[in-house]
Image (spheres, rainbow, N blue to C red):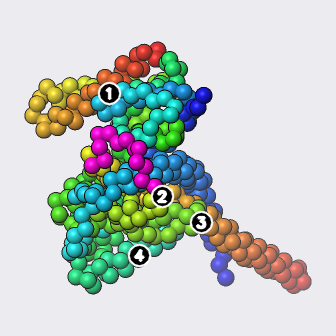
Amino acid sequence: MPSLKDIRRRIGSVKNTQKITRAMKLVSAAKFARANSAVTNARPYGVAFDAMVERIVAMAGDDVESPLLEQRPERKSLFIVLSTDRGFCGGLNSNLFKFSVLRIAEKRKENIEIEMVPWGKRAKLFSTKMKYKAVNAREKVLEKPSYQTAKDLADELIKKFADKEYDRIYICYVEFLSAMAQRATIKQVLPVGKSRAVDAPVAVADATLLVEPGPKELLEGLLKRVVASTIFKCMLEGAASEHGARMTAMDSATNNAQEVLRGMKIEYNRARQAAITKELIEITSGAQAL
Amino acid sequence: MAELQVSVLTPSKIVAKASTTYLQVPGYDGYLGILPGHTSFVTELGVGELKIGEGDKEVYFVSGGYLDVNNDKVTVMADVAEPLPQIDRKRAEEAMKRALQRLDQKTDVDIIRAQAALMRAQMRLDLSARAR
């Protein structure tokens, strides 16, 4: 049986751990609230933007052409894996990585060469561990998602795609469903899916729609922005997922610590009681002997 | 009289929502005035001031993005939209210095970008000076 002192020390260390997890939970809760409102605030722009692209595409008809729409046979593809920088967020990253490994294996089976861009420290570690060919690793993508970063990253990718360095560019990220639920997902970034712009419930082509400088001139910039806003959305959702997952993970860690503490307290009391009883027996038997 | 339902959006937030009878926006090659009953219209935005309503009551600095007019519903999807009091003068001044330096050196390939940056900084400063 462990001594009283041992148990007391263990209780102390669990309590300290609990303090840390509780603090982390509170911090994540605050960050989560911010990330969550960022996702909500970004929504109207996305909706309005998609509606506008739809209207223009409906008007321009089938003759929309752009290097960003070009569907080439898939020989070499780029996988972006968007992870967090820090751990302590439950299975968030490992689920994402498992998911990515599967997708990459699928592509490899079809003899497609895969390169990977890790965005986030965890993804970087993951790519080293899996010995993927990683290019342009980046950290702290999810720390402060800004549209400017998304745009810069999008420009880089667009350039690579237009130079025919890659035939497809995908992004694996964690979709944000709610604070409790996140799901690893994959999205095609480039070429911009015509399906997304064209097959969507097409707004009735508006004959009077005036486009300046002209649908074709406008389209190039629009498509670039589609890419940027896709990435921006992934970043926002990834950040919200991160904080949501960390909040939940830290909450359950705090609760678990509570459970452990309860068990240890019972053990402690029992040990204390046993010590007292033993002492009493010693005293009484000592008294009897006199 | 019919009114325009204006919403000013940026990728990260809703900057303003208003209903008005007149809107002035910076198009890519000059200012545009939008009145109720305007035809469906899409255009690229330039750098400049966005005015909601007559006079200088509601003015924003806007740069880049698109304007979508659809049945008196006007959506301004700007890359940047700042109400005048929120313009960061210090940052604009620094940006202006940087841009001027780049233009001076002329070694930089990105003269167009530096010029655009200069224009943005200048416009920010002008607008915020007027707001005070």
Label 3 near label 2: C-beta < 8 Å?
Answer: no
Q: Which residue is mark 1?
A: B30
Residue at x 82% of width, y 79% of height: A277
Majority secondary structure of magenta residues: loop
Q: Earlier in the sequence, mark 4 or mark 3?
A: 4
Q: Amino acid at mark 1?
A: Gly
For residue A237, the mark is: 2
* Pointers 1 and 4 within a single chain: no
Q: Amino acid at mark 3?
A: Met
* Pointers 3 and 1 within a single chain: no
Q: SS at mark 1? A: strand
Q: Which residues are magenta?
A: A204-216
Q: CA distance from mark 4 to mark 3?
A: 19 Å
Q: Which residue is mark 4?
A: A99
Mark nearer the viewer, 2 or 3: 2
Q: Is residue B19 magenta?
A: no
Q: Chain letter for mark 4, please.
A: A
x and y, in percent, of residue B120 in the image: 31, 29
Q: Which residue is mark 3?
A: A180
Q: Residues within 10 Å of mark 1 (few under 14, many from 20)?
A: few
Near-viewer residue (A262 or B10): B10
Q: Earlier in the sequence, mark 2 or mark 4?
A: 4
Q: Quadrant of residue A25?
A: bottom right
Residue at x 21% of width, y 55% of height: A159
Q: Residue furthest left?
A: B107
Near-viewer residue (A193 or A206): A206
Q: CA distance from mark 2 to mark 3?
A: 13 Å
* Pointers 1 and 2 within a single chain: no
- Location of the N terminus of chain A by quadrant is bottom right
Label 3 near label 4: C-beta < 8 Å?
Answer: no
